[in-house]
Amino acid sequence: MAGEKVDLTFTINTDMEEMLKNAAQKYELPDVSKALRVILDYVIEDGNWDEIFGKVRCSRCVGGPLGRMY
């Protein structure tokens, strides 16, 4: 358990929670919190912030990959 951790509350969509649960299970992580920390570590280390945050994504909007489900 490297580094100091803080408890935070986030609001996410149910499909995002399911994705974190699946990642935790698939990669034998202790919980969804660890799965999210892995993703955040990737963003910090290898992510292109302009590419990540500069593009508006709405996967739940009409036309988005999840929006087509509605």
Image (tube, rainbow, N blue to C red):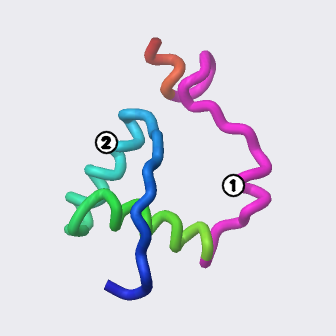
Magenta region, residue range: 45-65
Residue shown at 48% from the left, 64% from the top: 39
Query: Of marks 1 and 2, which one's residue comes earlier in the chain?
Result: 2
| Residue 42 as seen in the image, left or right of residue 58 | left
| Residue 1 as seen in the image, left or right of residue 52 | left
Residue shown at 25% from the left, 62% from the top: 31
Tell me the number on the disc at residue 43: none
Q: Does dot 1 land on a helix, a strand or a loop?
A: helix
Instruction: Decide: few, some or many residues near mark 1? Use Cα within 10 Å; few <14, some 14-19, many ≥20.
Output: few
Task: Give the amino acid at mark 2.
Answer: Glu
Above-or-below relation of 28 to 67: below
Above-or-below relation of 27 to 21: below
| Residue 47 as seen in the image, left or right of residue 13 | right
The x and y percentages for residue 3 are 43, 86
The x and y percentages for residue 54 are 79, 50
Residue at the top extreme of this rendering: 70
Instruction: Decide: few, some or many residues near mark 2? Use Cα within 10 Å; few <14, some 14-19, many ≥20.
Output: few
Residue at the bottom extreme of this rendering: 2
The x and y percentages for residue 62 are 61, 16
Task: Give the amino acid at mark 1.
Answer: Ile
Q: Quadrant of residue 13?
A: top left
Residue in front for this viewpoint, 47 or 33: 33
Residue underneath mark 1: 52
Question: Separation of disc 1 and disc 2 at Cα?
Answer: 21 Å
Above-or-below relation of 24 to 3: above
| Residue 53 as seen in the image, left or right of residue 23 | right
Tell me the number on the disc at residue 18: 2
The x and y percentages for residue 43 are 59, 67
